[in-house]
């Protein structure tokens, strides 16, 4: 998630933010500031090892397929700016070739309704998940949440970003991805750089997810002659698998939502929830997924309220986004340009961005 970077003076400001977080951590141990301080230490490690992409390639610090992927990022960024109207910033113009930590994400929900646990932090406000650079920290917090009787989800995150407060680098793990996955992530993050609505996590992620998917498909189409048949096949299978998985999870979400809104006693709700999840798990095994990774999706993301809310956070309103894109003739650049006016609308009211965004587009006369 990104916002436009400011180079040297922002680096000084970032150092001040980290120093303030550390001071607050000592003042209030166990508070959210302590969490910020721990993550700040890893953030410093990530940022201090940044090297410009071209220098890393020139000096042989990144070679082979990884170097090809690093070169590809420049083309993806240029495509996003030129064809989609995404903001051009300094994210992913550097690489930390030695940073091997994995980012872990923890989220939680009430077990008998879709109600996410939230945490408050300075500047960013309330958020429905926590990120960690150490699995042990993530598992410890997950255990504490489970002891409260909450549904919990622990997962690895594909990429780490800071909403543009820092110039986020590429990590070695990203350079192992297929071209399509890499393009999707970079374009998703550049979408955040272009439009980020404070306090609207679900809308921000769903919008960036939609633009990332659309822009990835168009980028790969523009590059089809330069991609290997294997990359093209993986991209087609990946897009198909995503649609199958999204349809499946959408069905499960709405099934359980109906159970939670039934008005039945809590014990009956939990019994019916367990029955529906068991049935959904069997149905998942029958999905014709080509990707070995997606075939094991439920092993990494067991079905519960936290995992379904996590999915929903990135996939709400996809059909409505598609409808609005159609209203501007499929012009993705125009679609993004109109959406940027949403922040103006929200400054005038406290409405739901999912409901307000339709007013930015021409009326549907069909």
Image (spheres, rainbow, N blue to C red):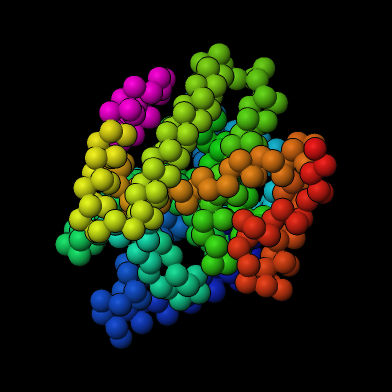
Image position, residue 9 (x, y; %): 61, 71
- Residue at 35% in and 64% down: 117
Image quarter in which the C terminus is found: top right
Q: Is residue 241 magenta?
A: no
Image quarter in which the N terminus is found: bottom right
Relative depth, front residue between 181 and 314: 314
The residue stretch that appears in magenta: 281-299
- Say if residue 83 shows up in the picture: no
Asked if residue 261 lies left or right of residue 302, the reply is: right
Furthest-left residue in this view = 147
Relative depth, front residue between 248 and 209: 248
Relative depth, front residue between 252 and 3: 252
Asked if residue 258 lies left or right of residue 10, the reply is: left
User: How many circles with numbers are drawn on the protein?
Assistant: 0
- Residue at 50% in and 21% down: 237
Asked if residue 268 lies left or right of residue 94, the reply is: left
Image position, residue 70 (x, y; %): 55, 36
- Residue at 46% in and 57% down: 47
């Amino acid at each position: 998630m990104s916002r436009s970077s400011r180079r040297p003076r922002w680096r000084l400001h970032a150092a001040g933010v980290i120093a303030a977080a550390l001071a607050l951590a000592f003042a209030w141990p166990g508070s959210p500031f302590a969490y910020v301080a721990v993550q700040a230490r890893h953030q410093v490690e990530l940022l201090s090892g940044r090297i410009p992409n071209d220098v890393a390639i020139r000096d042989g610090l990144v070679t082979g397929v990884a170097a090809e992927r690093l070169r590809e990022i420049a083309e993806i960024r240029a495509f996003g700016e030129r064809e989609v109207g995404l903001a051009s910033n300094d994210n992913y113009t550097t690489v930390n070739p030695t940073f091997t930590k994995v980012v872990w994400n923890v989220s939680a929900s009430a077990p008998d309704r879709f109600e996410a646990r939230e945490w408050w932090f300075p500047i960013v406000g309330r958020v429905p998940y926590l990120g960690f650079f150490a699995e042990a920290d993530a598992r410890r917090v997950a255990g504490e949440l489970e002891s409260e009787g909450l549904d919990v989800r622990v997962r690895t995150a594909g990429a780490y970003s800071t909403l543009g407060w820092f110039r986020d680098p590429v990590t070695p793990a990203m350079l192992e991805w297929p071209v399509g996955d890499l393009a999707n992530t970079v374009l998703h993050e550049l979408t955040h750089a272009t439009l980020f609505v404070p306090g609207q996590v679900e809308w921000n992620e769903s919008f960036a997810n939609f633009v990332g998917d659309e822009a990835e498909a168009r980028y790969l189409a523009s590059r089809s002659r330069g991609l290997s048949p294997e990359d093209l096949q993986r991209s087609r299978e990946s897009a198909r698998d995503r649609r199958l998985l999204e349809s499946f999870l959408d069905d499960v979400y709405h099934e359980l939502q109906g159970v939670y809104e039934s008005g039945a006693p809590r014990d009956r709700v939990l019994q019916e929830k367990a029955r529906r999840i068991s049935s959904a798990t069997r149905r998942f095994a029958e999905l014709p997924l080509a990707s070995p990774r997606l075939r094991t999706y439920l092993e990494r993301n067991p079905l519960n309220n936290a995992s379904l809310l996590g999915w929903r956070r990135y996939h709400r309103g996809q059909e409505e986004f598609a409808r609005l894109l159609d209203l501007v003739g499929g012009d993705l650049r125009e679609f993004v340009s109109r959406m940027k006016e949403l922040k103006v609308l929200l400054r005038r009211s406290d409405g739901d961005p999912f409901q307000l965004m339709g007013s930015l587009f021409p009326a549907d006369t069909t």
